[in-house]
Amino acid sequence: MHDPAERPLTVAIDGPAASGKGTLAKRLAVVLGVPHLDTGLLYRAVGRRVLDAGADPADAAAATDAAVALVPEDLSRADLRGPVADAAAAKVASVPGVRAALLDFQRRFAQGGAVLDGRDIGTVVLPDAPVKLFVTAGLDVRAQRRYQELVSRGGAVPDFETIRAEMAARDEADRTRTAAPLRPAEDAAILDTSDLDADGALARAEAIIRWKLGV
Ligand SMILES: Nc1ncnc2c1ncn2[C@@H]1O[C@H](COP(=O)(O)OP(=O)(O)OP(=O)(O)O)[C@@H](O)[C@H]1O
Ligand SMILES: Nc1ccn([C@@H]2O[C@H](COP(=O)(O)O)[C@@H](O)[C@H]2O)c(=O)n1
């Protein structure tokens, strides 16, 4: 669909938790022949660093220090998923110093073309990206996906209602924070995956990209 040797393509993907943006971003990156960055991992790793230091992820100074000290190896930690990491990530993400510390890395990653997914990619990180997608789905659908994901991983799984409530709370915090709140960029295409499987979402995204690029 796109020849990366001709022109590196940058795709900005945002959306709420478990909307399928990460799955889509990973697959689109393969199709487009560009690298993928799951920017949520950055916030998760910062949250973990703060917890390791015995501090509160809502403590702006501790969170900013952790973001400044972040190293690539932090992104490979095995404990970046799950309810504790979810909550810590959302707390550090509301700290402006944390967001500022992570901005350069994300922009440099995207320089030669890339797919980035997160909450503020189209609005703040890559406002000039030629393709912006806002991936969404109903809360029940998203909570059900996350529940199934946790069950298939094995181990202790919170009940569906707990997952749904925690997801709703995290979405609300992400939408209402002052620093880079979750919202679609004005020029983003909205992709609702409630009734689409991963293949359907990829096909719809490819169609949007063709239309945006006029190819
Ligand atoms: N279109 C889809 N239909 C059904 N399930 C999907 C779809 N896309 C992704 N999934 C599944 O839903 C779960 C959440 O998807 P994914 O991790 O891509 O979401 P996300 O938006 O990146 O979430 P988060 O922001 O919490 O990391 C995964 O188990 C994934 O396999
Ligand atoms: N660009 C981003 C990406 C993530 N966040 C915050 O991190 C939390 C975890 O993100 P996941 O995508 O891994 O679920 C998320 O709830 C946000 O608080 C962000 O602010 N900006």
Image (cartoon, grey):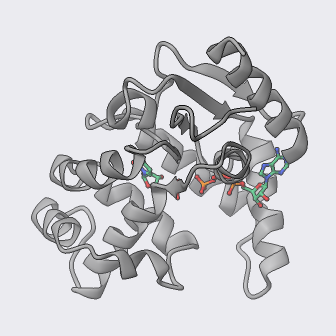
Mark yes or no: residue 36 visible.
Answer: yes
Residue visible at 34% across and 37% down in the picture: 125
Residue visible at 43% across and 74% down in the picture: 75
Residue visible at 38% across and 23% down in the picture: 128
| Position above or below: 110 against 132 | below
Q: Quadrant of the N terminus?
A: top right
| Position above or below: 193 against 106 | above
Q: Position of residue 168 (x, y in %)?
A: 59, 46
Mark yes or no: residue 197 visible.
Answer: no
Q: Quadrant of the C terminus?
A: top right
Q: Identify which residue, 141 or 184, lies in the foreground.
A: 184
Q: Position of residue 204 (x, y in %)?
A: 81, 28
Q: Is residue 167 left or right of residue 39?
A: right
Q: Is residue 115 left or right of residue 63?
A: right
Residue visible at 23% across and 86% down in the picture: 54
Q: Identify which residue, 54 or 6, lies in the foreground.
A: 6
Q: Identify which residue, 19 or 176, lies in the foreground.
A: 19
Q: Position of residue 38 (x, y in %)?
A: 52, 56
- Most extreme residue toward the front, as rendered? 6
Which corner quadrant of the image does residue 32 belong to? top right
| Position above or below: 32 against 186 | below
Q: Position of residue 123 (x, y in %)?
A: 38, 27
How many marks can you see?
0
